[in-house]
Amino acid sequence: MLKLDLNLPEVRKVLQALPAKREELFEMMRFDVKEAAAKYLNNLMNMELSFFLGRDKYQRTFIDFSERNYRNGSYSRTFAVKGLGKLKVTVPRDRLCEFNTSVLPKFNQYDQSIQQDSVLMFLAGVSTRSVELLSEKLLGRKLSHGEISQSTQELKEAVDRWRNRDLSAYKIKYMILDGVNFDMRISDSIEKVPVLVAIGVTLEGQRIVLGFQAGDKESATSWREFLKDLKRRGLSAQSVVLGMMDGLSGLEAVFKDEFPKADIQRCQVHVARNVITKVPQKLKKKVADELRDIFYAGSRKKAWARYEAFIKKWDTEIPSACKSLKNSIKQCLAFYKFPKEEWISIRTTNMIERLNKEFKRRTKPMEIVAGEKSCYTLLAFISLKMEMSWRQTPVGKSPVRQPWFIEFTQNS
């Protein structure tokens, strides 16, 4: 056995050199691990061939020579393993070409966890191009744009099943509706494609994404088809008692047709913004304060009295702003019919605005979404993530948020 003797000065010299050689040390460790992993796979495949042939290497048997199968060399191939990178292995062969190893997949060049991680990176917000650039360093093998796209294809069937799932098990009392635009590749051109989105609130206060589909958010026909599709999937028109929306053209009338028992709550933030834009700069703060007093009154009766006082005071000076408020006030105060602890959640469309904001944040690195199905895959993943966070804060038990007028001034 080789014995290595080092005196104290020599030990000190070796330790002092370690910081400068640290990366080389780790690289040697990685190389040794890769060699050990390749050797392990080689031994495993050789054992598998021995079991297939019924005898070990060089072992003689008394089988008729014409029926005997035996080893016939090997061929080299590479196989990437997560965290290790590409391993160079030798796959043994038999004379009759009957042996197929089950240790390594026949056509795959990397283990399944690399594929799974690339999909997770894509869904978590990393663009396809970035995944391609980072895959070799993070996963051990460089994945092409085509391989990443092919991996995400496998999700699309699951996404389609989720988008078309049965809704009859959910007892939905409130619905929030909105549309969001995406720059999407359609054939050979880039188009701005709106996607209609619906969130439901169950009797227990849990929020779920009911569905989304491409369609013109300014078109009553698109909204009608979208709502009818939700009902075909089992959503009960009888259980829905309130729909929250921001005054999109044609949406309110269509919603009332499809859900006749439901009231409509128009988003107070959008109404306030529309009113304030028609007010001179010097009066904006004062008018915003008085709108806040209307919308945050302790009862519908008080809110209506403050509204009438507002119109009486300002109708002559800012008639356009007053007309805008008159057209929306009834729908703005619909929330007073429902439990007080839920008012802060149902007076605006903040729930769906937050979801749409997450949609845009996730697709921003991509700049262009590669088609409708790719868009649905991303939105399904984001929706499921949001639902998990919503479980912690049911409607009616959510922490107090910023008042709408603060949100308005921050966004102006």
Image (spheres, rainbow, N blue to C red):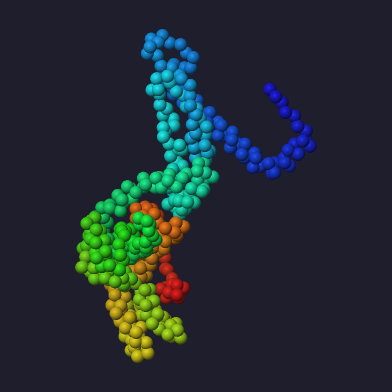
Count all numbered tags in the image, as a single digit. Answer: 0
Residue 32, located in which quarter of the rendered image? top right
Above or below, comparing residue 187 to residue 78 in the picture: below
The x and y percentages for residue 84 are 53, 38
Q: Quadrant of the C terminus?
A: bottom left
Q: Nearer the viewer, residue 82 or 215?
A: 215
The x and y percentages for residue 335 are 31, 72
Residue for point 43% across, 82% down: 284
The answer to whether residue 175 is seen in the rendering is yes
Q: Quadrant of the N terminus?
A: top right
Q: Nearer the viewer, residue 320 or 374?
A: 374
Farthest residue, direction front? 188
Residue for point 38% across, 60% down: 190
Residue for point 37% across, 56% down: 188
The x and y percentages for residue 205 are 33, 61
Residue 325, located in which quarter of the rendered image? bottom left
Q: Nearer the viewer, residue 222 or 188?
A: 188
Above or below, comparing residue 384 to residue 357 in the picture: above
Above or below, comparing residue 284 to residue 102 in the picture: below
The x and y percentages for residue 302 are 32, 81
Residue for point 73% across, 42% down: 16
Above or below, comparing residue 379 to residue 145 in the picture: below
The answer to whether residue 355 is seen in the rendering is no
Going by the image, does 328 lie left or right of 276? left
